[in-house]
Amino acid sequence: MSVRGSARSVMGRAGNSDALEHLARIGLIAYGLVHLLVAWLALQLAWGGTSRSADQSGAMATLAQQPLGKPLLWVLALGLLALAVWQAAEVLRWRHGWSSSGKTRTTALRKSGRAVVKAVVYVALAVLAIRFATGSGQNSSSSQQQTAAGVFGWPAGRWLVAIAGLVLVGVGAYHVYKGATKRFLKEIDLSDCPPAATRVVTRLGQVGFPGKGVALALVGGLLVWAAVTFDPAKATGLDGALHTVLAAPAGPYLLTLVALGIAAFGAFCFVRARYPERT
């Protein structure tokens, strides 16, 4: 067997591993918990009750200061890494569709691309959790500003930052569309879910996906603005995006709506840990 074939075989076994599936479920719960913590920080920001960053770093910092918080961060990191491996295994599972033609090939490519993006996000969050568990975590906004400043120094770096921002705006818009059209229901198998629970899941998705979509679009918009003004200080991430909402007319109320949407998305992640993904 070739090295490439061996790698596929290993990843295939990993994708079908019961142990990995259980870890991935823990990862989904962890992912949901991060969103709930961000939502809580956003609510506190809306009504003047927090000095923490209302983003993933603020959520990790809040968790790290709780009793048993640091061991819990290690559990979250392990679950998120398992989720990343799970997504990598999904790419290989859909890999055979790439050699097909027509709709099958397009679907396989789309699902594989989405799985790669998810894997990158999960790994980034896992690394963030590990940093806070080891006491070396830092504010996400500062990190993103430093990254943007570094990219600005590359050839065409300004355009790369703008493109990244536009991609985030597009992803955010797709989340809003996904929630409004209930498209998320095509990705989760609710055949064993009671009718009443199905209604709850549907409402969570209808509120959660648009809420997260708005947040992502705002983060992307700040990246685009940073590129337009050639000012990395404007690339302030989710915390900056939520502060932008707060500064708008009726800001506390608008921010409260966004926070509730993010919380609903977190609750939806808990549901995803219970029910399998459609293939």
Image (cartoon, helix red, strand yellow):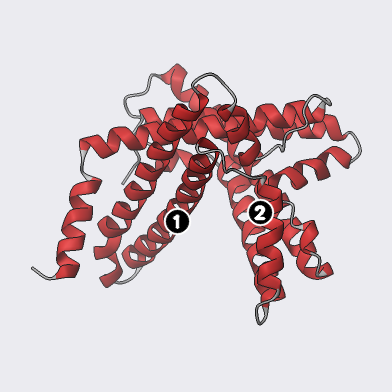
Label 2 to label 1: alpha-carbon separation: 25 Å
**Is residue 189 visible to us here?**
no
Point out residue 122 in the picture as x, y percentages from the top left corner: 46, 47
Counting every numbered tag in the picture gives: 2
Q: Which residue is mark 2?
A: 143
Tell me where residue 8 sits by quadrant.
bottom left
Point out residue 9 in the picture as x, y percentages from the top left corner: 16, 57
- Quadrant location, the N terminus: bottom left
Q: Earlier in the sequence, mark 2 or mark 1?
A: 1
Q: Amino acid at mark 2?
A: Ser
What residue appears at the point 29 percent right and 32 percent down from the top-left corner? 22
Most extreme residue toward the front is 135
Which element type, helix, strand or loop, lies under badge 2?
helix
What residue appears at the point 42 percent right and 41 percent down from the top-left corner? 80
Q: Which residue is mark 1?
A: 114
What residue appears at the point 35 percent right and 37 percent down from the top-left corner? 24
The label number, if any, that marks residue 171 in the structure image: none
Which element type, helix, strand or loop, lies under badge 1?
helix
Q: Amino acid at mark 1?
A: Arg
